[in-house]
Image (cartoon, helix red, strand yellow):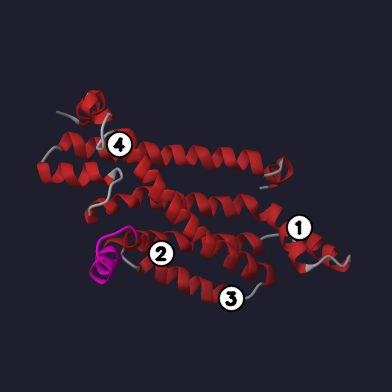
Amino acid sequence: MNVLNFVNAFFSDHAHWTGYDGIPTRVGEHVQYTLQALALAALIGLPIGLVTGHYGRGGNALSLIATAGRALPTFGLLVLMTLLLGFGLVNVMIPLVVLAVPPILVTTYEAMRSVDPSPVDAARGMGMHEAGILFRVELPVALPLILSGLRSAAIQIVSTATIAAYVSLGGLGRYIVDGLYQRNYEKVIGGATCVAVLALVTLGLFWAIARITVSPGVRRSA
């Protein structure tokens, strides 16, 4: 059987659409892991990137932190966390957050530094508070690039959250891990296809968010 036949056999099997191991359940679990990890990474990366980018300090330190975060092997970190913490959701969240923070952090910093200084100086000259400059002048202009960092982080999490299955959790990785153990390649390819489709859906969602939140003038100049 070729890949397309495996995909067709997986999705046409009604048993894969119901029950605790059904596609809706596994997609829901995968989305849950993704949203939790992305929210935690954003809570860490966005404030630091916004503040450091606004003041223009700490860029080298952020680059070092981001490089170190990208160098850590996600699966190796999962194994280490499992040995230290046992089986559970926390030891999955840690490597996923470590994976997602660098693109959010660095992109947010660079987005803030790329803002034209002229309106910033004008706002400061008018006596606007630093928080007002940050959120009312710089952030609207930097938003497209910030969203691209969040999008990159989300795609990486969607693609990597399959590791949850290695520590007895759910998600779409369950099909891949169980399929490999059972030598059921229909399940393996079906699970991988679901992950790929979910990644494409994530891209579409961020495109829609950008269309809604970014002003037309900023989009034209981006």
In this figure, which residue is indicated by the disc labeled 1? 137
Q: What element does badge 1 sit on?
A: helix
Residue 18: numbered disc? none
According to the image, label 2 marks what residue? Answer: 98
In space, the residues marked 1 and 4 are separated at their CA atoms by 42 Å
The residue wearing badge 3 is: 58
Give the amino acid type for the residue marked by disc 3 in the picture. Answer: Gly
Mark 4 → mark 3, Cα distance in angstroms = 41 Å
Mark 2 to mark 3: distance in Å?
A: 19 Å
Mark 2: give few (<14), some (14-19) or many (20+) Cα within 10 Å.
many
SS state under label 4: helix
Instruction: Tell which circle, 1 or 4, labels the residue nearer the N-terminal end.
Output: 1
Q: What residue type is labelled 1?
A: Val
Calculate the distance from the C-alpha at mark 1 to the C-alpha at mark 2: 30 Å
Indicate the quadrant where residue 12 lies: top left
Q: Position of residue 79 (x, y in %)?
A: 24, 65
Mark closer to the chain start, 1 or 2 = 2
Q: Where is residue 69 in the image (x, y as percent from the top left)?
A: 41, 68
Judge by depth and name the residue closer to the eye, 59 or 7.
7
Q: Mark 4 points at which residue?
A: 193
Q: What element carries label 3?
A: loop
Q: Residue at x 10, y 41 (%)?
A: 183
Badge count: 4
Residue pictured at 46% horizontal, 54% vertical? 38
- Residue ranking furthest to the front: 19
* The stretch drawn in magenta includes residue 115: no
Q: Are marks 2 and 3 in contact (CB under 8 Å)?
A: no
The boundaries of the magenta stretch are 76-89
